[in-house]
Image (cartoon, helix red, strand yellow):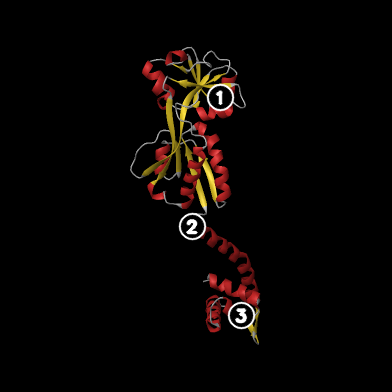
Amino acid sequence: MIERIHLDILRRIDREGSLTAAARSLHLTQPALSHAIRKLEDQAGVRLWTREGRRVRLTPAGEYLLGAAKRLLPQLERVDEVLAGYAAGEQGSLRIGMECHPCYRWLLKVVEPYLARWPGIDIDVMQQFQFGGMAALFNHDIDILVTPDPLNRPGVAFEPVFDYEQVLAVARGHPLADRDHVEAEDLTDQVLFSYPVDPDRLDIFTRLLGPARCSPRKHKTVESTDIMLQLVAAGRGVAALPRWLVDEYADELPIAPVRLGPDGIPKQIHLGVREADRGERHIAAFLDLAKESGRSISFPVGGPP
């Protein structure tokens, strides 16, 4: 029964002071405006205003409806703004799935400028996926997947963000700290820290220890990067991490990077997005910022040890 135009008419009459001015501001003729209110009065069975010359006086029912208009119209106008923002890609949320535990530190460098440039977009970071990151992307549980191990699947596009080298983080006084590189056999008497990820997805196992049929003395999982590197700095064990991450923490902790194998282990971080969403402005903007940030930390294999 009540339509938005009815509320808008009463608010405009209150603001403009007359039917003629209200009709003009709404781009209506005065007869059309009066007809809209008369139709509502007939449906509701109550008068909303009475005429007093060129002006109108609201009845108690009209005053009630005017109060409702003043409450509801700003909310509806906000809804319009939000929907317009969604349509323009300037409003909504961006859900980021992480398959790269140490990348949180890098992600902060992307999120800060992104939030400043896109104030209408909320960011949520997810790490636990019931069926894995790719399934979360296909199921629309996330919008972007951060991973060092992209899988080519129809409907998903992976954008390379930056190159890096996986290295062994050791304490500066560790016997391996001054080595040019370590072999798999060097880790058989070491405690190896890693994130809580299946060893089949850890490069130090699949590309160094596994092919040599070696195992560390003990393998312990730690969720926190800060705690893991505190343990390494204290000489409690070693950890395989990106060189850029070890270099950053080396300013705060007595740790050093050592190459894994004579040729090192090159890696690359990718951002995966659904092909259908690749052109969304807020997603494209995040990809651009991520690449820009990645260029500042890229550290290819073969650089300074």
- Can the viewer see residue 50? yes
Residues 120 and 160: in front is 160
Q: Quadrant of residue 66?
A: bottom right
Residue type at numbered disc 3: Ala
Q: Residue at x 41, y 49 (%)?
A: 277
Q: Is residue 169 above or below residue 282?
A: above
Percent across and percent down for residue 248 are: 57, 29
Q: Residue at x 54, y 42 (%)?
A: 110
Tell whether label 3 touches label 1 (CB within 8 Å). no
- Is the residue under label 2 in contact with that under label 3 (CB below 8 Å)? no
For disc 1, the marked residue is 228
Where is mark 2, residue-wise?
88
Q: Earlier in the sequence, mark 3 or mark 2?
A: 3
What amino acid is at disc 2? Ala
| Amino acid residing under circle 1 | Met
Left or right relative to 150: residue 31: right
Closer mark to the observer between disc 3 and disc 2:
2
Q: Is residue 46 visible?
A: no
Task: Name the residue tied to disc 3.
Answer: 21
List x then y, in percent, for residue 211.
Answer: 36, 19
State left or right for residue 17 relative to residue 91: right
Q: Nearer the viewer, mark 1 or mark 3?
A: 1
What is the x, y in percent for residue 212? Answer: 38, 16
